């Protein structure tokens, strides 16, 4: 340990990895994610290839802006996931790591899903080599790719479900965040897990979605406004002796 | 050789190995197979794939090998730099790792192009249409690269900061890594938002990338890490967030 002793008021304890900065990144994630959804809103019409293609070509810049904003939102969520790992490591290192893995794989699938949203831009882009298809065929293919993105969403929502469930458990077991946040996150996790059966999830919509939104909103606001109880975080961290490992 | 020095050289070697297939897989292969332009471009592209299938398959495998080595490069750099700031090192590793499944999934597009190019069994679809779909998946592979490239840029930010603060690597490398990161992210976002300017920004990003990443990977391999710090690392880091200092070990 080369760290000067003056830096360590509590022996063996480490300062809690900034809950505020986690809260700020979480807030930015919320804003970009919502903005991205707003940009894309109304462009894709379920089951109507012609209307979808017309909307998409008419609002191409907006569509691209929505995609880019969504990607930034995912990048922010990745940072939040990494910071959550550090925050909850003192509670249970293995479970915190497991949660991070679920979160990151979900983020990777989310990012890759954007490719299915980019495909319609290729198909409807008017390249000459596509003239072997008639307009209706191209529009149908474009809609097919957009619907593949919905299928990808069913996959990553399940993984986010496991993630939220584990984060809920970690909050509940932690001494530095209120237990009700843990319960809310676990419930949100169960809500996302309904996407194991997409018809069932659609049946419960929008209640399962609202649940997820409210839980994450509460956690974000709590981290932003209240932060975590630093003293108790340090207690838990030094109790585990975690930082010396 | 100190353990830091050895760790730096191993990381440098993995960094070079992970980057080496990129020019072949991501620049040379598309330049060989992708025919641009008129209505027959798709058929010409598909014909080239059918004619040189093995070369095309090598392109896919090279990218998968590159993505796999990238994991171990990330772990090696994490080990090297976690002593500087564990939080930044973890963020760096996370951003490295997230790009790997995207790269892997993206090769599915080239596999799809190959399947369709050899798609005699899809006889219900006209050959010209199959060839056009080959071209679509080839383009999608390129779009997938844009997605992965965001993370190829983002991880350079914590990496640059860590190198700058390390004390055992020259600060200039850290300074060069930041514009390299900006370049990749800007190139991806430009292709997404303003596709017409994509080419120009990518060329600038490639130069910035070579300058930042190229210099760093060869420095790590050839010069390793200094036994004695170049500069005394600030004890308290005197950063806005004073708590950061004591995360150091």
Image (cartoon, grey):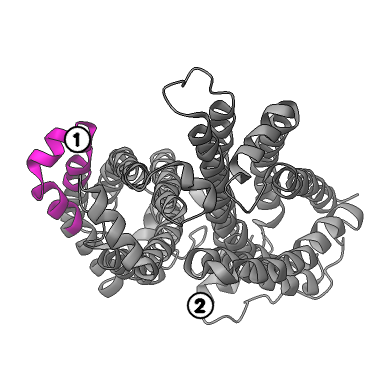
Distance from the alpha carbon under mark 2 to that under mark 1: 45 Å
Q: Position of residue A9 (x, y in %)?
A: 49, 70
The picture quadrant where one finds residue B167 is bottom right
Q: Position of residue A15 (x, y in %)?
A: 46, 65
**Residue placed at 66% from the left, 34% from the top?**
B60
Residue B185 marker: none
Q: Secondary structure at mark 2?
A: loop
Q: Nearer the viewer, residue A27 or B59?
A: B59
Q: Is residue A195 magenta?
A: yes
Q: Position of residue A233 (x, y in %)?
A: 36, 59
Disc 1 chain ID: A
Disc 2 chain ID: B
Q: Secondary structure at mark 1?
A: helix
Mark 1 is surrounded, within 10 Å at the Cα level, by few (under 14), some (14 to 19) or many (20 or more) other residues, namely some
Residue A198 marker: 1
The picture quadrant where one finds residue B90 is bottom right
């Amino acid at each position: 340990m080369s760290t000067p002793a003056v830096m360590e008021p509590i022996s063996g304890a480490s300062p809690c990895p900034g809950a505020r900065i986690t809260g700020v990144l979480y807030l930015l994630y919320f804003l970009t994610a919502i903005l991205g959804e707003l940009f894309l809103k109304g462009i894709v019409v379920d089951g109507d290839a012609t209307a979808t293609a017309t909307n998409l070509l008419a609002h191409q810049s907006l569509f691209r802006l929505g995609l880019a904003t969504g990607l930034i939102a995912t990048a922010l969520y990745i940072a939040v996931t990494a910071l959550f790992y550090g925050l909850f490591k003192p509670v249970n290192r293995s479970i915190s790591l497991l949660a991070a893995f679920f979160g990151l794989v979900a983020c990777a699938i989310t990012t890759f899903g954007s490719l299915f949203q980019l495909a319609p831009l290729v198909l409807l882009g008017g390249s000459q080599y596509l003239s072997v298809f008639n307009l209706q065929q191209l529009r149908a293919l474009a809609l097919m790719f957009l619907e593949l993105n919905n299928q990808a969403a069913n996959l990553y929502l399940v993984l986010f479900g496991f993630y939220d469930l584990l984060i809920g458990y970690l909050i509940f077991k932690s001494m530095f965040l209120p237990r009700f946040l843990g319960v809310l996150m676990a419930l949100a996790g169960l809500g996302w897990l309904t996407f194991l059966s997409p018809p069932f999830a659609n049946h419960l919509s929008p209640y399962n979605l609202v649940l997820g939104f409210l839980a994450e909103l509460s956690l974000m606001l709590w981290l932003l406004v209240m932060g975590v109880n630093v003293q108790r975080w340090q207690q838990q961290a030094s109790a585990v002796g975690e930082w010396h490992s | 050789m100190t353990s830091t020095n050895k760790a730096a050289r191993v990381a440098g070697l993995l960094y070079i190995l992970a980057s080496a297939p990129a020019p072949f897989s991501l620049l040379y292969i598309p330049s060989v197979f992708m025919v641009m332009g008129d209505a027959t471009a798709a058929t010409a592209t598909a014909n080239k794939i059918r004619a040189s299938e093995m070369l095309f398959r090598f392109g896919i495998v090279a990218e998968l090998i590159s993505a796999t080595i990238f994991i171990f490069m990330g772990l090696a750099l994490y080990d090297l730099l976690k002593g500087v700031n564990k939080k930044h090192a973890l963020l760096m590793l996370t951003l490295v790792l997230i790009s790997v499944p995207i790269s892997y999934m993206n090769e599915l597009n080239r596999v799809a192009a190959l399947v369709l190019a050899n798609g005699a069994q899809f006889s219900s679809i006209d050959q010209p249409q199959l060839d056009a779909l080959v071209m679509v998946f080839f383009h999608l592979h390129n779009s997938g690269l844009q997605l992965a490239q965001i993370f190829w840029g983002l991880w350079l930010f914590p990496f640059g900061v860590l190198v700058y603060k390390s004390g055992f690597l020259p600060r200039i490398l850290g300074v060069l890594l930041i514009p390299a990161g900006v370049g990749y992210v800007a190139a991806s976002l430009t292709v997404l938002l303003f596709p017409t300017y994509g080419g120009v920004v990518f060329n600038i990003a490639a130069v910035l990338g070579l300058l930042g990443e190229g210099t760093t990977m060869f420095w790590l391999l050839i010069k390793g890490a200094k036994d004695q710090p170049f500069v005394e690392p600030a004890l308290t880091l005197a950063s806005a967030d004073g708590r950061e200092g004591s995360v150091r070990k």
